[in-house]
Image (tube, helix red, strand yellow):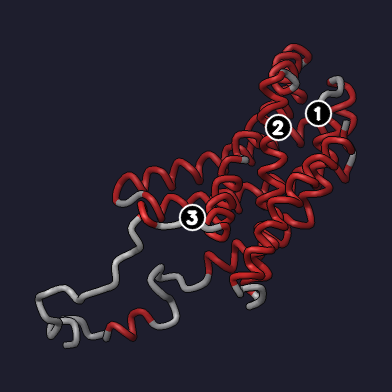
């Protein structure tokens, strides 16, 4: 027998069980990314196609390095959460769990690799 | 308990519109496109990170990554990704506007949808011209 009523179990948290936490995290990161993206597109777009010396010179400067690091950290978390949302819509059971773990891992590895490269270039 | 008293037969609920007779709408198309563009951009990000790692490593590593990224294939991927991220950027701003409780009338939502599609192409062209 359940001592909590259905209403009591659901109240304030919705069917996800975590309320608006996921949605709010996506909102916050999207605002951050909206500010970062135009600068980063300009930095990366300008650097792409340059010689190795030019690329190293660009990403050794504080502003391009910091913006790229922020894009990686905030962007890959935003991606991991967005991809999780997509997987939850289309897959269920063990497949869902494995796909979510895969997406989160991919995002984390991508961010970590990019940060490692930045540290090696900028420091 | 409330749960135990539920009748054994399932409650009658309205069915979703049948996919084959469901007219595609701009609002649903722009919403689906937001998801596709957001998730698809990971391909370009991974290529960019590989390129950055190669630049930090050695001349030969960079030569390989640079050759791939600046090939016709790389140009295709990055041009598509550039449009995708601008579209996702604009659709995201539209969602923030929706979330604040504005622009939800069908006519306004459709106008904003066209604005996202048009502006994403315009911003893609401007970015390409700017970084050349």
Front position in the image: A44 or B11: B11
Q: Which mark identifies residue A48?
A: 1
**Disc 3 and disc 1 in contact, CB within 8 angstroms:** no
Q: Residue at x 77, y 43 (%)?
A: A68
Label 1 marks a residue whose chain is A
* Disc 2, SS: helix
* Disc 1, SS: loop
Point out residue A10 in the picture as x, y percentages from the top left corner. Answer: 36, 79
Label 3 marks a residue whose chain is B
Label 2 marks a residue whose chain is B
Q: Residue at x 49, y 55 (%)?
A: B24
* A69 sits to left or right of A47: left
Q: Pointer 3: what residue?
A: B24
Q: Earlier in the sequence, mark 3 or mark 2?
A: 3
Q: Residue at x 87, y 36 (%)?
A: B129
Gap in Å between the C-alphas at discs 2 and 1? 10 Å
Front position in the image: A61 or B100: B100
Q: Pointer 2: what residue?
A: B78
User: Which residue appears farthest toward the left when viewing the image?
Assistant: B8
Between circles 2 and 1, the one closer to the viewer is: 2
Position of B78 relative to B118 (above/below) = above
**Disc 2 and disc 1 in contact, CB within 8 angstroms:** yes
Position of A42 relative to A34 (above/below) = above
Q: Residue at x 69, y 46 (%)?
A: B85
């Amino acid at each position: 027998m359940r001592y909590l009523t259905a209403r009591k179990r659901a109240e304030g948290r919705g069917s996800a069980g975590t309320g608006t936490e996921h949605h709010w995290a996506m909102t916050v990161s999207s605002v951050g990314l909206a500010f970062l993206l135009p600068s980063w597109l300009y930095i990366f777009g300008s650097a792409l196609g340059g010689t190795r010396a030019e690329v190293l010179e660009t990403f050794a400067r504080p502003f391009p390095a910091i913006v790229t690091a922020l894009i990686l950290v905030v962007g890959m978390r935003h991606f991991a959460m967005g991809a999780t949302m997509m997987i939850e819509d289309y897959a269920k059971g063990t497949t869902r769990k494995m796909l979510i773990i895969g997406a989160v891992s991919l995002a984390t590895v991508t961010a970590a690799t990019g940060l490692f490269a930045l540290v090696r270039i900028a420091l | 308990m409330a749960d135990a008293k539920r009748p054994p037969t399932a409650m009658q609920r309205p069915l979703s519109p049948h996919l084959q007779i469901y007219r595609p709408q701009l609002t649903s198309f722009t919403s689906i496109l937001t998801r596709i563009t957001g998730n698809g951009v990971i391909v370009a990000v991974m290529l960019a990170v590989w390129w950055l790692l190669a630049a930090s490593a050695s001349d030969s590593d960079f030569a390989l990554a640079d050759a791939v990224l600046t090939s016709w294939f790389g140009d295709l991927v990055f041009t598509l990704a550039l449009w995708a991220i601008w579209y996702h950027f604009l659709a995201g701003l539209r969602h923030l506007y929706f979330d604040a409780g504005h622009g939800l009338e069908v006519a306004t939502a459709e106008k904003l949808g066209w604005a996202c599609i048009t502006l994403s192409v315009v911003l893609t062209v401007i970015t390409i011209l700017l970084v050349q």
